[in-house]
C-alpha cells in the first residue's frame, strides 16, 4: 500500500502541491487526473522519493529493497543500447539477476519481442513505455507509479498498455497509480480516481461514481439519428457522424429505448465527461 | 559498487562519443607528427643554427623525444577540453535522457552512484592519457627515432636521450594527475549545472581562467605554491634542467588532495539534491 499524507511542495516559482493526501491499496489501479501543470508530476516524484516534500509524509508498507517502481514523464532509457542491455544495466546496479533467461523473462512479462537487437532509439513510444515498465518492475516493487503512460501512444498502443496494467494489478497484486490529463483512458482502467488542480485534490471517488455523478452529455452515433423525434425533447449538438445529447446518466436507458422504438439503430453511446467538469463541480 | 562500476564501464564503452574523443586525440597527435615530418627540421635549424656550431648533439634534434614533448603540450588546452566534455557528459547525458531518474527509482544509493561516476571518469581519463602516451611513443620513435631533447623554458634545457625519455614518462604521469583534476572539476560542475552545453561552457571557462591564473603573482607564497591553477603545470617542471623533485612531488600530492576534496563535495551536493 502506498500512502501520501498531507503533502505540500513549493518551488521558487510557484506552489506545486498543497496538502495532498492519496492512497492506493494493493491490486488497485488509481488514476490521477489533472491539467498540465496541476501538480501530478511533482506528486509522483514525491511518492517515488525523487524529491522531498516541504510538508507531509509518504508511507509505504513494504519490506522490498525497491518498494516503488515507476516512470516519471517519459521512460528514461539508454537510447544507444538495446532493450536487453538496458534491462541488464538497471538489473545489475541493484543486484537483480542479469543472466539471459532472467532478462528474457522481464521482456516477455511486458510483451516485448526477444529478437529486437537494435538500440531502443528505434523503438516506438509504446515499446519504450513497455520497456520502461519492465525496468520499473525489476526487483519486484509492490507499487507502480506511471506518469502519463498513454501520451504519444496510438489507440492500439493505449488498449494494449491498459491490458498490461490491468494484468499487473490483478495477477501480481501491485498497487498502481497512473496519471493523465485525458479522462477516457483513466476511466477505462482505474478503480479509483483523484482529480488534482492547482496542486490540490479537488475531487475523488470510484471511477464509476465520478462518471455517474458528473456526466452531463452523451455522444450517440446512429445511421439516421438526425431524423429522430425523441431527440427533439433534449438539447442536442449535431456533429458529422454523431449527436451530442445533454442529459444525465440515469436518463440514458430510457433515451436509448425510445430511439430503438423509432427504428434508429444506435451503434455507439459514449459519455462525454471532461476533466473541466470534474474540476468545476467542486469549486 | 562493483555492479555500478560495471554498468558505468558498459555505458562509456557503448557510446560513440568515447571513440570520437579518442579519435580527436589521435588526430591531434597525427597533425603534430605530419607537421614535424615536413617542417620540423627547417624550424629547428633556424632556432638552433648558432648552437649547433658550438655544441655536439647526439642524433638529430628532430627526434621521438621532441615529438613526445610537443604532444605533451596538448595537455595545456586541447586534451583537457576534450576530456572535460566527455567526462561531464557521463552525468549530463543522464539528466538529459531522463535515465538519472530511472536509476534513482531503482534500489541504488545516490552517493554510490555518484562515486561510481567519478571513479569511471578518472579511469577513462587515465586510459586516454595511457592511449595518448603509447600511441605517440610508437609513432614518434618509429618515425623519428631517439635523440637528445632540447626544450626552451626560460632558457634552453638539454637532456640526453635516456634522461629525456624518463622525464617524458614522468611528465605523462604528472600530466595525468592534472587531467584527472580537470575531469573531476567537470563532473562536479555537471552536478551543479545539469545541462550539457552549459557545463561545457563552464568547463572551458574554468580551463581558460586556470591557465590565466597560472601566470598571475598573488603575492602570498602559500597561494602561489598551492592554489590549484599554480599546480597544473607541474608536468612541465620536469623539463627544467635543475629539477626540484620534492616540489614536483608536493604539487602532485596537493592536486590529488584537491581532486579528492572536489569529489567529496560533488557527492555530498548530489546526495542532498532533489532529482527532478
Image: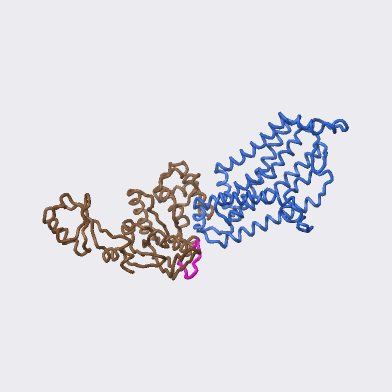
Residue at x-position 57% and y-position 49%: B89
Using the image, determine if residue A260 lies above or below residue B130.
Answer: below
**What is the quadrant of the C terminus of chain A in the image?**
bottom left
Is residue A58 covered in magenta? Answer: yes
**Magenta region:** A49-60
In this image, A43 relative to A190: left or right?
right
x%, y% of residue A105?
A: 43, 49
As drawn, the residue found furthest toward the right would be B54
Give me the chain that's blue.
B
As drawn, the residue found furthest toward the left would be A262
Residue at x-position 83% and y-position 37%: B160
x%, y% of residue B72?
A: 72, 41
Give me the chain that's brown.
A
Q: Is residue B7 visible?
A: no
x%, y% of residue A220?
A: 21, 55
Q: Is residue B242 visible?
A: yes
x%, y% of residue B7?
A: 56, 49
Is residue B54 covered in magenta? Answer: no
The foreground one among B46 and B182 is B46
**What is the quadrant of the N terminus of chain A in the image?**
bottom left
The colour scheme is: by chain
Indicate the quadrant where residue A25 lies.
Answer: bottom left
In this image, B194 relative to A60: left or right?
right
The foreground one among A51 and B54 is B54
The foreground one among A220 and B134 is A220
The foreground one among B134 and B61 is B61
Residue at x-position 50% and y-position 61%: A50
Using the image, determine if residue B37 lies above or below residue A108.
Answer: above
Number of marks: 0
Amino acid at each position: 500500500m502506498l500512502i501520501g499524507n498531507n503533502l505540500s511542495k513549493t518551488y521558487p516559482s510557484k506552489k506545486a502541491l498543497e496538502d495532498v493526501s492519496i492512497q492506493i491499496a494493493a491490486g488497485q489501479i488509481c488514476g490521477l487526473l489533472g491539467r498540465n501543470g496541476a501538480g501530478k508530476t511533482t506528486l509522483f516524484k514525491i511518492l517515488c522519493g525523487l524529491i522531498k516534500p516541504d510538508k507531509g509524509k509518504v508511507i509505504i508498507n513494504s519490506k522490498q529493497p525497491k518498494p516503488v517502481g515507476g516512470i516519471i514523464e517519459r521512460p528514461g532509457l539508454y537510447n544507444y543500447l538495446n532493450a536487453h542491455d538496458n534491462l541488464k544495466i538497471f538489473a545489475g546496479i541493484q543486484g537483480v539477476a542479469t543472466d539471459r533467461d532472467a532478462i528474457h523473462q522481464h521482456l516477455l512479462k511486458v510483451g516485448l519481442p526477444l529478437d529486437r537487437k537494435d538500440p531502443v532509439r528505434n523503438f516506438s513510444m509504446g515499446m519504450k513505455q513497455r520497456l520502461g515498465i519492465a525496468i520499473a518492475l525489476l526487483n519486484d516493487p509492490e507499487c507502480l507509479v506511471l506518469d502519463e503512460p498513454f501520451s504519444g501512444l496510438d489507440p492500439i498502443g493505449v488498449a494494449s498498455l491498459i491490458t498490461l496494467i490491468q494484468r499487473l494489478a490483478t495477477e501480481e497484486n501491485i498497487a498502481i497509480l497512473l496519471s493523465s490529463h485525458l479522462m477516457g483512458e483513466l476511466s477505462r482502467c482505474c478503480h479509483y480516481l483523484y482529480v488534482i488542480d492547482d496542486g490540490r485534490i479537488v475531487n475523488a471517488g470510484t471511477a464509476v461514481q465520478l462518471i455517474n455523478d458528473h456526466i452531463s452529455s452523451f455522444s450517440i452515433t446512429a445511421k439516421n439519428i438526425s431524423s429522430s423525434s425523441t431527440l427533439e425533447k433534449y438539447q442536442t449538438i449535431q456533429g458529422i457522424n454523431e449527436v451530442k445529447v445533454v442529459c444525465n446518466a440515469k436518463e440514458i436507458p430510457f433515451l436509448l429505448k425510445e430511439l430503438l422504438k423509432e427504428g434508429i439503430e444506435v451503434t455507439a453511446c459514449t459519455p462525454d465527461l471532461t476533466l473541466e467538469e470534474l474540476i468545476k463541480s467542486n469549486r | 559498487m562493483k555492479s555500478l562500476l560495471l554498468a558505468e564501464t558498459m555505458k562509456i564503452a557503448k557510446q560513440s562519443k568515447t571513440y570520437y574523443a579518442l579519435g580527436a586525440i589521435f588526430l591531434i597527435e597525427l597533425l603534430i607528427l605530419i607537421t614535424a615530418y615536413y617542417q620540423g627540421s627547417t624550424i629547428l635549424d633556424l632556432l638552433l643554427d648558432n648552437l649547433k656550431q658550438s655544441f655536439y648533439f647526439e642524433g638529430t634534434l628532430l627526434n621521438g623525444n621532441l615529438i613526445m614533448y610537443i604532444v605533451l603540450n596538448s595537455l595545456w588546452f586541447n586534451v583537457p577540453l576534450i576530456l572535460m566534455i566527455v567526462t561531464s557528459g557521463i552525468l549530463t547525458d543522464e539528466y538529459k535522457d531522463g535515465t538519472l531518474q530511472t536509476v534513482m527509482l531503482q534500489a541504488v544509493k545516490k552517493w554510490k552512484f555518484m562515486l561510481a561516476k567519478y571513479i569511471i571518469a578518472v579511469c577513462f581519463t587515465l586510459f586516454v592519457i595511457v592511449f595518448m602516451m603509447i600511441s605517440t611513443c610508437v609513432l614518434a620513435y618509429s618515425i623519428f627515432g631517439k635523440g637528445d631533447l632540447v626544450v626552451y623554458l626560460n632558457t634552453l634545457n638539454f637532456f640526453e636521450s635516456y634522461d629525456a625519455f624518463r622525464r617524458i614518462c614522468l611528465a605523462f604521469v604528472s600530466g595525468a594527475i592534472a587531467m584527472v583534476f580537470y575531469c573531476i572539476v567537470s563532473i562536479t560542475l555537471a552536478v551543479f549545472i545539469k545541462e550539457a552545453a552549459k557545463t561545457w561552457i563552464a568547463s572551458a571557462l574554468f580551463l581558460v581562467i586556470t591557465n590565466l591564473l597560472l601566470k598571475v603573482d598573488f603575492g602570498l607564497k602559500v597561494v602561489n605554491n598551492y592554489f590549484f591553477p599554480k599546480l597544473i603545470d607541474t608536468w612541465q617542471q620536469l623539463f627544467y634542467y635543475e629539477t626540484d623533485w620534492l616540489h614536483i612531488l608536493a604539487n602532485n600530492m596537493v592536486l590529488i588532495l584537491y581532486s579528492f576534496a572536489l569529489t567529496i563535495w560533488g557527492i555530498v551536493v548530489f546526495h542532498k539534491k532533489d532529482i527532478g
